């Protein structure tokens, strides 16, 4: 919390050694002087320089070393002349001034180190974002080349080519979602909705907590949801206008459970043999240490995906230093 507050404060920074920087120093010292004057009515014995420390800190963070030194000197003059002991300046006054000045120099040094650290961090963030955009651009080009190769190779099998390119685009779109997500960990709800977007109207009810997924889990689940959506459009609930899909998820000690329930579509029955799409779904879940249970009820497909914490915890710790790959916040339903 304190770090966030300091970063927000440094966002208000002015150029060091500028007129605005020195005006800020004068304004902060003036404000501190007014506060010290008002506090004198509550406690006349308050030390002269107590309220000037925050003023020097603010100036050091926002305006740099030169303005902070000016603020320190002005504070020493104001504190001594206005709130020091009456009569000639004593050795104690001199000692208090020296200690105040030394303390302010330490504050200025720490604030300047923090300013330099924030500046380096922001420079690195800009560089990282540029690199991510470059990688994203190259990744899109690579997927486009692969898609073109598939279309040309399977020109005599357009349906098969369409299925394969759909899967390629699913992975490509997921990479876009990952690159724009906080900490490169996309939200499960966003991931699911993205799989419906290429097919028009969204006919699914989503309910569950906010779940952040590591990149590996997001890519595998993306392919799983792509296969489920495609199957629902071809053979399941979304093949009829009144069809709907209920998608819910929750976490417990065992990990993440996602339930996919189709209603309002044609009657279903178990397939005679396992197709490539089914094998792909099972393979993706196994690669994450999870499993999939599907039931072809007459009312529609009911599918349960289970993804354990244990399998992805190491990936998450390597990526972000956290203890679990699947992080969630309290549930919300839309």
Image (cartoon, rainbow, N blue to C red):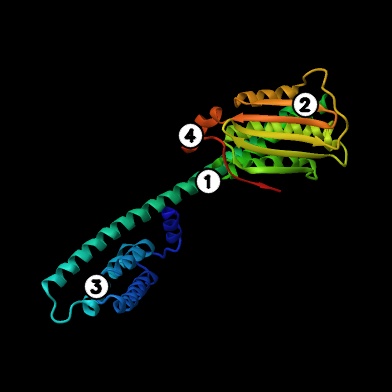
Mark 2–mark 4 Cα distance, whole angstroms, equals: 35 Å
Across and down, in percent, residue 151 comes to 76, 29
Task: Give the residue number, with chain letter if any, for mark 2.
Answer: 295
Along the polypeptide, which appears first: circle 4 or circle 1? Answer: 1
On the rendered structure, is 207 left or right of 253? right
Q: CA distance from mark 2 to mark 1?
A: 44 Å
Closest to the observer, 244 or 142: 244
**Residue at left 68%, top 34%?**
258
Label 2, residues with CA under 10 Å away: few <14, some 14-19, many ≥20: some
Q: Does the image show residue 212?
A: yes
Q: Which label number is shown at residue 7?
A: none
Q: Which residue is mark 4?
A: 317
Residue holding disc 1: 129
Circle number at residue 48: 3
Of mark 2 and mark 1, the one earlier in the sequence is: 1
Work out whether mark 4 precedes mark 3 in sequence or the reverse, and give the earlier one.
Answer: 3
* Quarter residue 286 falls in: top right
Q: Secondary structure at mark 2?
A: strand
Question: How crowded is the residue under tag 1: few (<14 C-alpha within 10 Å), some, or many (20+)?
Answer: some
Count neighbours of disc 3 (C-alpha within 10 A) and say few if under 14, some if 14 to 19, many if 20 or more. many
Identify the residue at image location x=72%, y=43%.
206
Mark 3 lies on a secondary structure that is loop
Q: Considering only vertical position in the picture, is 171 above or below 203?
A: above
Question: Which label lies toward us, 2 or 4?
Answer: 2
Residue 278 location, quadrant: top right
Residues marked 2 and 4 touching at CB (< 8 Å): no
Measured in 3D between alpha carbons, the distance from the residue under mark 3 to the one under mark 2, in whole angstroms, is 78 Å
């Amino acid at each position: 919390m304190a770090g966030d507050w300091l970063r927000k404060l440094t966002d208000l920074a002015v150029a060091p050694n500028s007129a605005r920087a020195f005006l800020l120093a004068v304004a902060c010292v003036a404000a501190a002087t007014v506060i010290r004057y008002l506090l004198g009515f509550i406690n006349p014995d308050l030390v002269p320089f107590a309220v000037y420390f925050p003023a020097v800190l603010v100036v050091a963070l926002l305006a740099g070393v030169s303005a902070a030194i000016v603020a320190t000197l002005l504070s020493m003059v104001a504190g001594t002349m206005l709130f020091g002991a009456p009569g000639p300046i004593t050795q104690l006054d001199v000692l208090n001034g020296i200690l105040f000045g030394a303390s302010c120099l330490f504050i200025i040094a720490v604030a300047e180190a923090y300013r330099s650290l924030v500046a380096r961090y922001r420079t690195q963030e800009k560089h990282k974002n540029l690199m991510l955009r470059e990688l994203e651009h190259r990744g899109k080009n690579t997927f486009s080349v692969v898609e073109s190769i598939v279309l040309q190779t399977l020109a005599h099998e357009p349906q098969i080519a369409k299925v394969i390119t759909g899967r390629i685009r699913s992975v490509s779109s997921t990479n876009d979602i990952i690159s724009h997500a906080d900490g490169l960990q996309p939200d499960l709800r966003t991931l699911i909705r993205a799989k419906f977007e290429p097919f028009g109207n969204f006919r699914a009810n989503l309910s569950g907590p906010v779940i952040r997924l590591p990149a590996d889990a997001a890519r595998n689940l993306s392919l799983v949801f792509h296969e489920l959506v495609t199957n629902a459009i071809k053979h399941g609930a979304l093949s009829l206008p009144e069809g709907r899909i209920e998608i819910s998820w929750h976490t417990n000690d065992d990990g993440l459970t996602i339930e996919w329930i189709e209603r309002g579509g044609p009657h279903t029955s178990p397939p005679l043999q396992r197709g490539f799409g089914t094998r792909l779904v099972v393979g993706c879940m196994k690669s994450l240490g999870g499993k999939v249970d599907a039931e072809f009820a007459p009312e529609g497909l009911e599918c349960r995906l289970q993804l354990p914490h244990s399998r992805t915890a190491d990936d998450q710790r390597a990526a972000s230093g956290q203890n679990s790959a699947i992080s969630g916040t309290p549930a919300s339903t839309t």
